[in-house]
Image (spheres, rainbow, N blue to C red):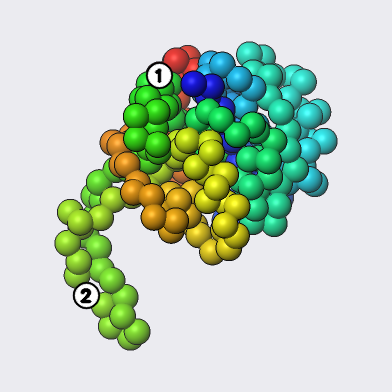
Amino acid sequence: MERYAIVVAGGHGARMSSEIPKQFLPLCGEPVLAHTLRKFGSIGTEPILVLHPDWINYWKDISKTLDRLPLHRIVPGSTTRAGSVYNGLNALPVNGLVAVHDAARPLISNSLISNLFKQAELHGNAVPVVECRDSLRQLDRNDSRAVDRSQFRIVQTPQVFDLTLLQHAFGKGGFELYSDEASLVESIGVPIHLFPGEESNIKITFPVDFKIAEAWLNSKGDSTGF
């Protein structure tokens, strides 16, 4: 079964307090996006990179200076993440498996990507999750209450789906209401198959996350192989 990947990099990264979106900021000397794309360079097809239209030429220019960058197709993004994924889906055929991944998660391992594709081939979808480490409280108007953290999981990407299934879910309309693809697919009555994710598969959101990611990459040496 053919394997595809959509790497979503359409955001501006406002929480990084930078004029340049976080996916282009340097991580161990290279853009975050370069590290992420390399992880999907071995799936057999060119990854679909969804970029904000204002930054397409910027990426084309800096990518010329990068080594070992896999061939990839660039698709203009939308004003929302869901809209950007939809644009990426429209660039793919109707059969196969597709992984949807946040560009700001450059620490994903090759083994997890491979396992998620295998699980999606068996179950129709595969979504990586990790346990909650911290205590949780649920807000209720002006009050809050403790909840059992063992009943909750933190959702990561890549989320992998049967391509026909995901395109069907997006075709129902209203996809902008859902925060991720798993929620959208669940809304059409399809059970979601959870699979153990990785604690290291963090999403770079704040400046401190760069320090964590750099420490991890430095400890692994070649960032493309773990």
Q: Nearer the viewer, residue 217 or 108?
A: 108
Tag 1, which secondary structure?
A: loop
Q: Answer above or below: position of 75 versus 132.
A: above
Q: Where does residue 99 sit, x and y in percent of width and height?
A: 50, 34
The number of callouts visible is 2
Mark 2 closeness class: few <14, some 14–19, many ≥20 residues within 10 Å: few
Tag 2, which secondary structure?
A: strand
**Residue in the picture at 17% in, 54% down:** 150
- The C terminus: image quadrant: top left
The residue labelled by disc 2 is: 145
137 relative position to 7: left or right: left
3 relative position to 199: left or right: right
Amino acid at circle 1: Phe
Q: Nearer the viewer, residue 101 or 98?
A: 98
Q: Where does residue 208 sit, x and y in percent of width and height?
A: 46, 45
**Residue in the picture at 75% in, 43% down:** 76
The residue labelled by disc 1 is: 226
Q: Nearer the viewer, residue 44 or 170?
A: 170
Mark 1 closeness class: few <14, some 14–19, many ≥20 residues within 10 Å: some
| Mark 1 vs mark 2, CA separation in Å | 40 Å
**Would residue 207 be seen by someone viewing this image from the given angle?**
no
